[in-house]
Image (cartoon, coloured by chain):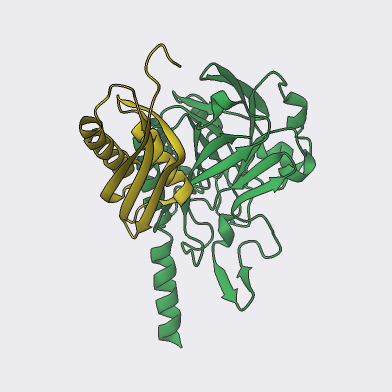
Chain colours: A yellow, B green
Amino acid sequence: MEAPVISPDVLARYAGDAALEVDGISGLTRDAAAVTRTGSRAEVVVHVELQWGARSEEVAPQVQERVAEYLGRMAELEVGSVDVVVERVGAPPGKQ
Amino acid sequence: MLAAGAAVAGWAWFEAGWLRRRVVEVRLDGVPAELDGVRIAHLSDLHLGVPSRGRRAVGHAVEWVSERKPDLVCITGDLISRRRGMGDLERLLRDLGRCYVVLGNHDFADSRDPFSQRVDADALAGLEGVVLLTDQSVAVDLRGSRVQIVGVDPRSYASREAKPESMTDESANLRILLCHFPGIVKRIPGAFHLILAGHMHAGQIVVPYPGGKLRLAHLRAHDVEGVYEYGSTVLHVSPGLGTTFLPFRLFARPEVTELVVRSA
């Protein structure tokens, strides 16, 4: 069966929500997420804020995995790539 | 000519079972942020009990909804066309789990179809998980917020006795009205945040022509499918899943919809 009809805005929200579930991600930045879809394939870019002390090389693959899994389940899209852009690092504890 | 006609009929028979699954955001004025992201599955016009590929669309729709586990499942009438669809309906409703249901004109055999038969409303209301609303209101707790669901009975709609606006609970953060007929929106502007309706089948058999579409099931109707805004009320008209009269759909695919609430 063809994938469900879901607007790019909603797909982007799915991607953002999934990224936020990963430990080490403290937020999305202004650009948040964007999903480009061709048929049942999707390319994703998420702009995130990394938690203070988290290591991007450990967190980013988890974001990629979580986003691909979530878009696969909720939108039945095959995710080709997930670019994780770390735009900033959150404030250290005690200095907020 | 005959071959072309047969080809169109063949296609329309196929299209009746060709389900579209859609996710739509609805921006609701005055709904608090806690309810942002609430997902509501909307199914309508199942018309069980007649031979139609619409049954296939219904089966796939129920499967999709069960997988997604939305916060609320609502069905806006015309559950059966013939009494023999009752057993099938009961099985499908069991798969859906808790759902809020109103009846339609076909459920009371009030239609142009001379063989139409009534639904067994008592059997339906007795099913576990089914909340049948016949001019009734129910309150649900979602994420610590109060959500009110009111359902209109098609008979009192027809006799113009339905007064759902008199049942509104102002303390509810989200008020939803279920009514088989989309025309209800004009009688009660602003009383509910969201109204879910069916009945139109998106025209069911639609003849496109330059500059427009002729919707044969409801020739003069507007608000035939999708999301419409009436002031602070959002109306969603489901294209429905089944077929009436003829087991065909043309340019009017069956649809199951998931509405995602956005607080505004």
Quarter of the picture containing the N terminus of chain A is bottom left
Q: Nearer the viewer, residue B212 or B56?
A: B212
Give how far across and how far down residue A22 sits, in percent. 30, 28
At a point 66% along the width and 25% down the height, the residue shown is B136
Residue B226 image offset from top left, x and y in percent: 58, 52
Determine which quarter of the picture holds residue B93: top left
Residue at the image position 64 percent from the left and 75 percent from the top: B211
Along the viewing direction, whichever of B187 and B191 lies nearer the viewer: B191
Q: How many marks?
A: 0
**Residue drawn at x 48%, y 43% as measured from the top left:** B83
Q: Is residue B51 visible?
A: no
**Residue B54: x and y, percent?**
43, 54
Q: Is residue A67 above or below residue B11?
A: above
Left or right: residue B154 versus residue B106 is: right
Q: Is residue A1 above or below residue B190?
A: below
Q: Is residue B200 visible?
A: yes
In the picture as drawn, the residue positioned furthest to the front comes out as A95
Q: Quadrant of residue B152?
A: top right
The image position of residue A15, as x and y in percent, is 37, 40
The residue at the point 52 percent across, 40 percent down is B259
Tell which residue pokes out farthest to the bottom in this image: B1
